[in-house]
Image (tube, rainbow, N blue to C red):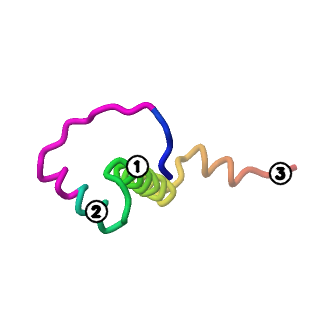
Amino acid sequence: MLNCMHSTSVRIDSATHDDLKRLAGELNTTVGNTVTLAVRALRQQRIGHDLRAGLRDDEQAWLDAELG
């Protein structure tokens, strides 16, 4: 999953960096890839949250509409 791409720096506290290094070691990957995986997991979590939310009134009305 290691790609040649533009990189940038992000400031984080040392405890978070230590956590990232530990996780990267456990996953046998780089700190950068660990951040990528964490962002993906957070995005998936948000999608799951959105999918569990109830339908808006207009969405429910669309689903209840007659077809013909």
N-terminal label among 2 and 3: 2
Q: Mark 1 points at which residue?
A: 36
Q: Position of residue 7 (x, y in %)?
A: 38, 33
Residue 67 circle label = 3
Q: Could you tell me which secondary element the residue under label 3 belongs to?
A: loop
Q: Residue at image x 59%, y 43%?
A: 58
Task: Tell me the kind of residue under disc 2.
Answer: Leu
Residue 7 circle label = none
Residue 23 circle label = 2
Task: Tell me the kind of residue under disc 1.
Answer: Thr
- Per the model, the C-alpha gap separating discs 2 and 3 is 52 Å
Q: Residue at image x 36%, y 66%?
A: 27
Q: Residue at image x 49%, y 38%?
A: 4
Q: Which of 57 and 4 is in front in this view?
A: 4
Q: Position of residue 47 (x, y in %)?
A: 48, 53
Q: Could you tell me which secondary element the residue under label 2 belongs to?
A: helix
Instruction: Point out the residue furthest to the right here.
Output: 68
